[in-house]
Image (cartoon, rainbow, N blue to C red):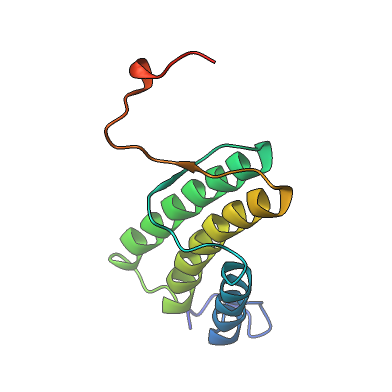
Amino acid sequence: MPADVHPKQARITQQEIEQLEHEIDRMNAELSPLRSFVLPGGSRLNTELHACRTICRRAERLAVSLSHEQEIPAEAVQYLNRLSDAFFVWSRWANHRMGVPEILWEPNESASGREKA
């Protein structure tokens, strides 16, 4: 533990990581298995959760870079990794609960080739 951290300062532990993994599993149980990449969209909440996931992934990459320069708790990086996965599952779950279909990535369909509705 770094010298400047107060002994009673809150910190991420393995218990928080396991709790988040349990939450991911619980939400995922309601969802159909993925057969394609899922794109943000369908609802505002879904899109905002995808943005949260992107920001969380960025924080994880920064934490990993920082860990090469100074000591940081491994649990912090692991938690950021699981949290970004949770944001993804929550985005899928939100659309599922609202009855909004997922937007699947169609690799052979370009945006310019789509028909106008």
The residue under the point 55% across, 79% down is 17
Q: Residue 90, image x and y in percent?
A: 61, 58
Number of numbered tags placed on the structure image: 0
Q: In this view, does 63 lie above or below 78?
A: above
Q: Choose between 49 and 107: the one closer to the eye.
A: 107
Query: For residue 7, which quarter of the picture?
Result: bottom right
Q: Where is residue 9 in the image (x, y as percent from the top left)?
A: 66, 78
Furthest toward the right, the residue is 98
Q: In this view, does 50 lie above or below 81?
A: above
Nearest the eye: 62 or 46: 46
On screen, 46 above or below 57? above
Seen at 52% across and 56% down, the residue is 88
Q: Which residue is drawn at 59% across and 74% down?
A: 20
Q: As rendered, which of 69 and 101 lies closer to the eye?
A: 101
Please report the residue visible at 35 percent of the width from the left and 37 percent of the height from the top. Answer: 106
Quarter of the image with the C terminus in it = top right
Residue 60 % position (x, y): 42, 59
